[in-house]
């Protein structure tokens, strides 16, 4: 994750990082907290400035973003919502090496901070480089050895990687956002997404191709037909080799979703045709009631309150379309409310992002791909239940 001012000062280092197959993420322009967290406008200007510099240096941007200092107490719901609308994937960490807790933290202390952290399925370790962090470099071999000894493999962060993200906490910055400002910023964010359509690149080593992102309609007249051009490209973040080709469609009026979408839930297929779902801002938008039926969940409608309650195992999810909020109720946990969730009212009910719906119901997307006129998404989703043990002796 790079600062724009450092990208500008050390372009050759940035090119080397990319050439060696690493992912590059946006980390704001100057890392000055009081500037970037004074308002979303200020934050947006910094990441946009860094994005422009990255494009100038490398020829490509990035949708990976890490908030300076992490999102906790720095981000509010508006930050998440607007960055999501812009196509950014915000990442935090779940292992802190503590290498930035003070100056010149010794390597032994850094190793201890990492190796004493309880193990999880995915470990994202926060470490820093640059002046004053020479000890981190010395600690790294022992940290790598520790994880390898515990059966871990190492991988670059990609847009398809599982998200490690802090919960929303009480924001420590004084700021406000008017409705008109929100609308203006949302328009900016969606314009950014329209300009940054990832091109699907042939890569036989990729396990999970990226989900297609909707392209904003161009200002071409309807009479102009799309023109397909094959272009040579340079290496990209996943380390594919120079000389591959990408297909660019020029003059396209509107993105088209695949004709069919096959959602495989716990091995059971659910097929939707293009009139039953949509593609919005790069997300498959599906009927929540249809998904619930496939999961054998109980659905309760409250037309007066414009809400849908889905009960699956011990968990309940309440979708309030009128206020665009979602409540998640799970035994043993505090009730969670998610504001500003995108929902579409359709003749057959409420439609929301497939990924959002699956995660709300306690599942995960294990693989997805789009090829020609069809898309396939594989899902694992099992209800949380109580297991009773009986002593029959």
Image: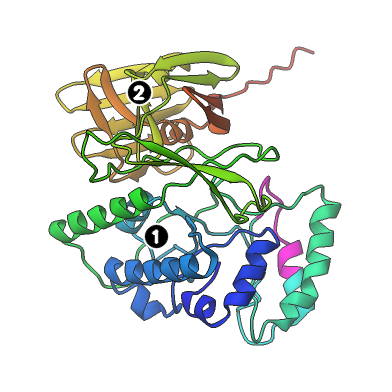
Query: At 31% across and 27% down in the image, what residue appears?
Result: 351
Task: Tell me if residue 168 is in the magenta stretch.
Answer: no
Q: Position of residue 350 (x, y in %)?
A: 27, 25
Q: Quadrant of residue 78?
A: bottom left
Q: Which residues are magenta?
A: 112-123
Name the residue beneath numbered marker 1.
169
Q: Is residue 121 magenta?
A: yes
Left/right of residue 147 with respect to residue 250 in the rendered view: right
- Lower sequence index among marks 1 and 2: 1
* Residue 62 position within the rendered picture, expressed as x and y whole percent measured from the top left: 49, 58
Q: Secondary structure at mark 2?
A: loop
For residue 292, the mark is: none
- Decide which of 193, 12 is in the foreground and name it: 12
Q: Which residue is mark 2?
A: 277
Residue 271 appears left or right of 118: left
**Residue 126 in view (yes/no):** no
């Amino acid at each position: 994750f790079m600062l724009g001012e450092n990208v500008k000062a050390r372009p050759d280092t940035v090119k080397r990082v990319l050439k060696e197959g690493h992912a590059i993420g946006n980390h704001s322009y100057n890392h000055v907290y009081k500037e970037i967290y004074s308002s979303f406008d200020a934050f947006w200007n910094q990441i946009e400035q860094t994005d422009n510099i990255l494009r100038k240096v490398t020829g490509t941007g990035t949708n990976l973003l890490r908030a300076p200092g992490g999102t906790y107490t720095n981000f509010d719901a508006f930050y998440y919502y607007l960055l999501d609308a812009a196509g950014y994937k915000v990442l935090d960490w779940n292992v802190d090496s503590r290498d930035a807790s003070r100056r010149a933290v010794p390597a032994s202390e850094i190793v201890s901070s990492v190796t004493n952290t309880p193990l999880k399925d995915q470990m994202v370790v926060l470490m820093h480089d640059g002046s004053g962090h020479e000890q981190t470099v010395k600690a790294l071999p022992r940290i790598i050895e520790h994880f390898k000894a515990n059966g871990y493999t190492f991988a670059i962060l990609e847009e398809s990687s599982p998200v490690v993200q802090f919960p929303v906490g009480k924001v420590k910055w004084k700021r406000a956002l008017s409705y008109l400002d929100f609308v203006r910023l949302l328009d900016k964010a969606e314009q950014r997404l329209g300009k940054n359509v990832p091109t699907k690149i042939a890569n036989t080593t990729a396990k999970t191709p990226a989900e297609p992102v909707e392209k904003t309609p161009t200002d071409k007249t309807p009479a102009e037909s799309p023109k397909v051009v094959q272009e040579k490209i340079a290496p990209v973040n996943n380390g594919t080799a120079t000389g591959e080709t990408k297909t660019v469609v020029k003059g396209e009026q509107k993105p088209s979703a695949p004709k069919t979408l096959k959602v495989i839930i716990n091995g059971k297929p659910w097929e939707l045709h293009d009139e039953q779902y949509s593609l919005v801002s790069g997300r498959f938008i599906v009927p929540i009631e249809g998904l619930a039926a496939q999961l054998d969940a109980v659905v309760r409608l409250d037309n007066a309150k414009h809400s849908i309650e889905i009960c699956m195992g011990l968990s309940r999810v309440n979708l309030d379309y009128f206020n665009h909020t979602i409540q998640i109720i799970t035994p043993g946990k505090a009730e969670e409310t998610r504001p500003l969730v995108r929902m579409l009212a359709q003749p057959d009910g409420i439609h929301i992002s497939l990924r959002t719906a699956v995660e709300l119901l306690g599942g995960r997307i294990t693989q997805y791909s789009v090829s020609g006129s069809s898309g396939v998404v594989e899902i694992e989703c099992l209800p949380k239940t109580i297991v009773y043990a009986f002593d029959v002796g």
